Image (cartoon, grey):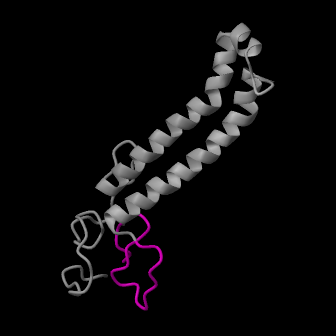
Amino acid sequence: MTDTDTQRSDEPQVRSDGGRDGSVDYLNSEVNIFKPSTPFMRDHLRVVWAMFAAWALIVFGPVTATYLATDLMTSVTVIGFPLHYLLTAIGAPLGALVLSLVYARKRDALDEKYGVDHSATRQSTEGTPAADGGVEK
């Protein structure tokens, strides 16, 4: 078990959810996607739900628009392709790729905000932040 009260003075002080203040027992916290127990989890789920909504719009939007406005989507041509084909065949896969990039950037920003450092390798695992921002015990 990790002694969270003794920190080295050279370690950076992180915010309350960085896992170093010992106020949150991450390993025994209940995992509920609708009611996250830590600020890190809440922020991460906010990003995940936003990316999911954007993905659903990108993937199902052109198909739904083609169903609802068939004449418009099939008669408009963009760079030689009908609009419904362009959005479904090129826009959806490209949009998913862009969403992956955006998610990676957002996740890196969250890791930086909460002090999660994936590049650090330590001799001892004591006090090492876990991937969810908590401290591995």
**Quadrant of the image occupied by residue 132:** bottom left
Tell me which corner region of the image, top left, top right, bottom left or bottom right, holds residue 77: top right
Give the x, y percent position of residue 9.
Answer: 20, 86
| Side of 129 where 25 appears, left or right | left
User: Horizontal placement of 8 versus 110: left or right?
Assistant: left
Image x and y of residue 50, in percent: 45, 40
Span of residues in magenta: 117-137
The one of 35 and 18 positioned closer to us in this rendering: 18
Task: Please provide percent x and percent y for residue 89.
Answer: 76, 33
Examine the rendered structure and indicate whether residue 64 appears above or below residue 124: above
Asked if the magenta segment contains residue 91, the reply would be no
Q: Residue furthest top?
A: 71
Position in image of residue 129 (x %, y %): 37, 73
> Which residue sits at x=24%, y=65%?
15
In magenta segment, residue 134: yes
Does residue 78 lie above or below 105 as drawn?
above
x 34%, y 49%: residue: 42
- For the N terminus, the image quarter is bottom left
Farthest-out residue, bottom: 123
Res 28 visible = no
Q: Can you say whether 37 is above or below 92 in the image?
A: below
The residue under the point 26% across, 78% down is 12
Horizontal side of residue 114 vs 54, given as left or right? left
* Image quarter in which the C terminus is found: bottom left
